[in-house]
Image (cartoon, rainbow, N blue to C red):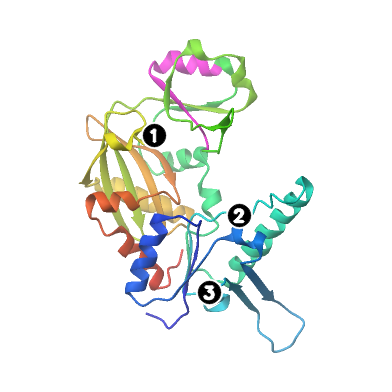
Amino acid sequence: MTEQGPVLVATETDDATADMVIGELNRRSVPVVRFNPADLQDGTLTVSARFGTCPGVPVAGQVRTPSRTADLTRMRAVYWRRPDWPAYARLGADDARYAAAQARHGLGGTLYSLAGPRWVNPLRNAAADHNPAQLALAQRLGLPVPATLITNDPDEARDFLHTYGQVIHKPLRWTPYQRDGVPVTGWAAPVTAEEIDEGVRVTPHLFQARVPKVADLRVLVVGRRLFAVRIDSGLLDWRRDYSALTYSVATLPAPVSAALLAFLDHCHLPTGSFDLALDRAGTPWFLELNPNGQWAWLEHATGLPMAATLADLLAEGATP
């Protein structure tokens, strides 16, 4: 292992997955600096960087929290987990929008320019997080992909439903949403042609032929290691009821494993969580990639060394 500085962990305040990885790093005596970008708005997080003009003076940068200081030019790795960006709720709308943009470009740009290539996952998360791009890439790599239509044309949607019969609708992107002040979540759910109306024209919708599945698979990839967990539930969308789930360690066919590794290589991501649907013939169908998907509860359920493997990747100075 090279002699390097700490691992920088950017995440929200409550993050059980990050806690597990940090615990593993502590057991390896790897120093950690944890921060949340949202803390910029109350001044408890400070970022500083210097560039140019002075001959012989190197580029320098620091991130400081109330208890830690990180030299950004000496980072062993950056674990970009699930950070919150500041919302600046105490400012007016225009000022808040301006300040939020400065925060993303000032802090994000400084980290990306000074902390080197060792990112898990890098800021490439956003590019890899578009469902249409994922489906196209999975198809190119030879993974089975359910017939899918993305459209805001009601006639095309009805035609797709008549063609494939059993079809589901699911959000293209999870987004915080409330109705009458009550948080709601969009699940994968069956849809019929009779339900399609002119409201579809407002924005693109995702319609997908339903896979005759017997179980789901969540596959965490860390570096070149794959951890596949079979999730049995009988539910169309297993996230609706965690109490109904049972778990077992699964083995993927070699071509599927190779395709998932190639998928992350294409996206320049050292880790990611894939969701697959397992049909009656044992074929895993690609559904989506979550570059920063949750997996802590799966380690607890199966004993797979997920956190330890990710800690190894970070401690070694992971490269994309």
**Location of the N terminus (image quadrant):** bottom left
Name the secondary structure under disc 2: loop
Residues marked 3 and 1 touching at CB (< 8 Å): no
Name the secondary structure under disc 1: loop
Circle 1: residue type: Val
Q: Is residue 106 visible?
A: yes
Looking at the image, residue 129 lies above or below residue 177: below
The stretch in magenta equals: 156-173
* Residue at the image point whose x is 61% and y is 54% from the top: 85
Task: State the separation of the CA atoms marked 3 and 2.
Answer: 20 Å
Q: Which residue is mark 1?
A: 145
Is 146 displayed left or right of 46 in the figure?
A: left
Name the secondary structure under disc 3: loop
Residue 19 position in % (x across, y down): 39, 61
* Residue at the image point whose x is 64% and y is 24% from the top: 202
Residue 126 among magenta residues: no
* Residue at the image point whose x is 27% and y is 52% from the top: 300
Residue 262 position in % (x across, y down): 39, 52
Circle 3: residue type: Ser
Q: Neighbour class for label 2 at 10 Å: few (<14), some, many (≥20)?
A: some
- Closer to the camera, 180 or 320? 180
Residue 47 position in % (x across, y down): 64, 70
Q: Neighbour class for label 1 at 10 Å: few (<14), some, many (≥20)?
A: many
Q: Which residue is mark 2?
A: 85
Circle 2: residue type: Trp
Residue 41 position in % (x across, y down): 66, 59
Whichever of callouts 3 and 2 sits on the residue coming sooner in the sequence is 3
- Marks 1, 2: nearer the viewer: 2
Looking at the image, residue 191 lies above or below residue 75: above
Q: Which residue is mark 3?
A: 67
